Amino acid sequence: MKYIAFIFFIAITFVRCKSDPKKERLEILKKSLDTISFNDTYSYEDYKMFIVENNKTITSRELCEIDSIKAQMDIEKNKLTFFSRHAQNRPIESLEKMPEILKEEYDINTVELLPGCLINDSTEYGKCYERLMQKAINKKYGNNFLDKVKRTADSIYLHENRNKIYSSKNSYAMFQRLISDDYQNWRDSIRRSLFDKMAFPKDNPMKKDGSAGFIIKGNGTIDSLDVYTYNSIEKNHLSYEEQIKKQMENLIRKTNWLPFETYGIKLKTKEHFFFTEH
């Protein structure tokens, strides 16, 4: 550990000193950084946190300089690392095989980063190593390479788990579907169609708001249908609520639903629609 601390003492001295011996110190720094390897999340976290904890006055720019030197050295040796950033609490389930595919087929390591675990990367200097690695991967394999690997991992998972119920939380294809314009337009058209077909009693005191959740199976039939209304439940409103629920259930069951098909598989998908008074 003392040796590592000495490495970063040299590193900080290098990035702060602008005198003639800088080239000599650069060679010492490179030899020191060459002894450090990132092959998983923990080793990368240890590297980042150790720099900060043992150099309390290090600036983001100085850290970026060290990271950039280290990244360039690793890229020249074809030691590439993919940094997976999870904006959510948990990654999409179907992408669990992605690190395995990257390692076995392309010899690319994976580091999974959770928000707040490492140095703040909100500035241009916060993620220099990651940025250079991403650029190197794109240059070698193409800008669509990672999306291709994600779809490969997703396809393997879905073929191995055909009977699961899928949503944007456990399938990459479902996540891509959810954020697509086509899917949003489809959902909007369904909502409008269902609401327009509803026959609300003229003396209905309830606001016309509610939602429906159900599963579309591979053959186009639905299962596990639940309809909700968002109103305060009072005795004199119960009959109206039951009328609305029954109508919505009948309309949904009579609708011809097309199952979502991807990678040659018709999936069971969890759907959720809101209906509201305009």
Image: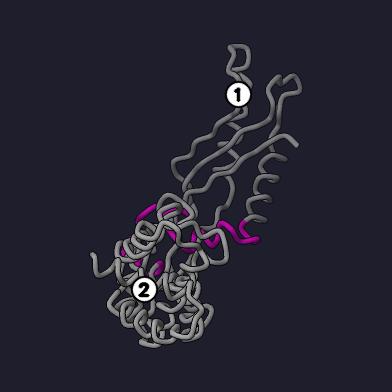
**Viewer-proximal residue among 154 and 264:** 154
**Please, is residue 183 above or below residue 192 in the view?**
below
Count neighbours of disc 1 (C-alpha within 10 A) and say few if under 14, some if 14 to 19, many if 20 or more: many
The answer to which of marks 1 and 2 sits earlier in the sequence is 2
For badge 1, the amino acid type reads Glu
Q: Which mark is residue 165?
A: none
What residue is shown at x 49% (from left), y 70% (from top)? 64
Q: Which residues are the magenta region?
A: 154-183
Q: CA distance from mark 1 to mark 2?
A: 73 Å
Q: How is the image coloured?
A: one colour
**Magenta span has 242?**
no
**Residue 20 image point, x, y percent:** 48, 85
**Viewer-proximal residue among 93 and 262:** 93
The quarter holding residue 242 reads top right
Q: Which mark is residue 10?
A: 2
Between label 1 and label 2, give the one nearer the viewer: 2
